[in-house]
Image: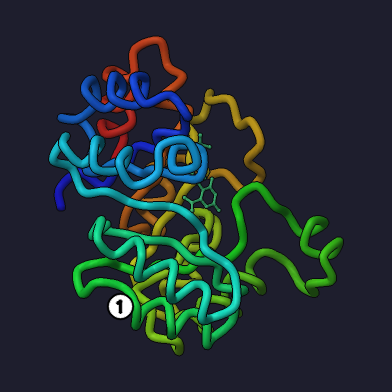
Amino acid sequence: MSNRIYVALDTPDLTRAKAIAARVRHHVGGIKLGLEFFSAHGQPGVHAMAEFGLPIFLDLKLHDIPNTVAKAVQALGALEPAILTVHASGGRAMLEDAKAAAPIGTKVIAVTMLTSLDAADLAATGVTGNAHDQVTRLTELAREAGVDGIVCSGAEVAAAKAIWPKGFFVVPGVRLPDGAIGDQKRVVTPRQAMDAGASILVVGRPITQAEDPDTAARAIGATL
Ligand SMILES: O=C(O)c1cc(=O)[nH]c(=O)n1[C@@H]1O[C@H](COP(=O)(O)O)[C@@H](O)[C@H]1O
């Protein structure tokens, strides 16, 4: 894949999602649809967006008992997404069963520590150590469970790749130096994330909230 940018179309508005996709389709490598879009439009919405001909990253961050997650993955299988997310903290059996239930061509990717969290958030949930500790711990778990890769911030991707050279590394929470950070906490630039070993970047608001999403996507691509 030449273009490593997946645009996150985080909107419940199908018309708006289509309009942005139409504008950026030649400047991104894929489309990410998450909870906001899927809660509003479900599988028909995913089919509608697949018509743009770009790979679909279905980011539902599944997290439940193994049987429930496996059945959900099976139900989503008809969509044949290029990428599907689950939470690594769901545990090894859940990760194994999610991978087993996914179509052959779907990468099952485990979210380690959300980029909106920092060490204080971890401590508040009873998790010891810092972001690096948590990401490397869950990267090892994901690798052992046999999924395809992980999601982490650009600050940890080099460490994760060192322990899983063949993993697929998804990095969201990227911002250009002058960009608004919003609710993200562990942020790096797109270039830093790629240099550290990201396989793909997820970019939402820096493209979707830009006055000209097309120019914004191209500008980010030009930094890589
Ligand atoms: O799995 C993800 O894509 C994800 C994981 C994570 O740790 N942090 C994170 O921001 N994301 C997603 O990446 C996108 C980031 O959006 P922006 O902050 O607007 O660029 C959103 O769609 C999030 O759901």
Q: Is residue 115 above or below residue 27?
A: below
Q: Is mark 1 within 8 Å of ligand 1?
A: no
Residue 203 picture location, percent across and down? 41, 38
Few, some or many residues within 10 Å of mark 1 (<14, 14–19, 20+):
few
Q: Position of residue 18 (x, y in %)?
A: 28, 25
Q: Is residue 123 left or right of residue 218?
A: right
Residue at (39%, 68%) from the top-left corner? 73
Out of 188 and 199, give the one closest to the viewer.
199
Query: Residue type at mark 1?
Result: Lys
Looking at the rendered structure, the number of numbered marks drawn on it comes to: 1
Q: Quadrant of the C terminus?
A: top left
Residue 141 vs 117, above or below: the answer is below
Identity of the residue drawn at 53% across and 81% down: 66
Which residue is tagged 1?
166
State the colouring used for the structure image: rainbow
Where does the image place residue 127, in percent across and percent down from the top left?
A: 79, 72
**Residue at (27% x, 19% y) in the render:** 214
Residue 132 higher or lower than 49, as above or below: below
* Disc 1, SS: loop
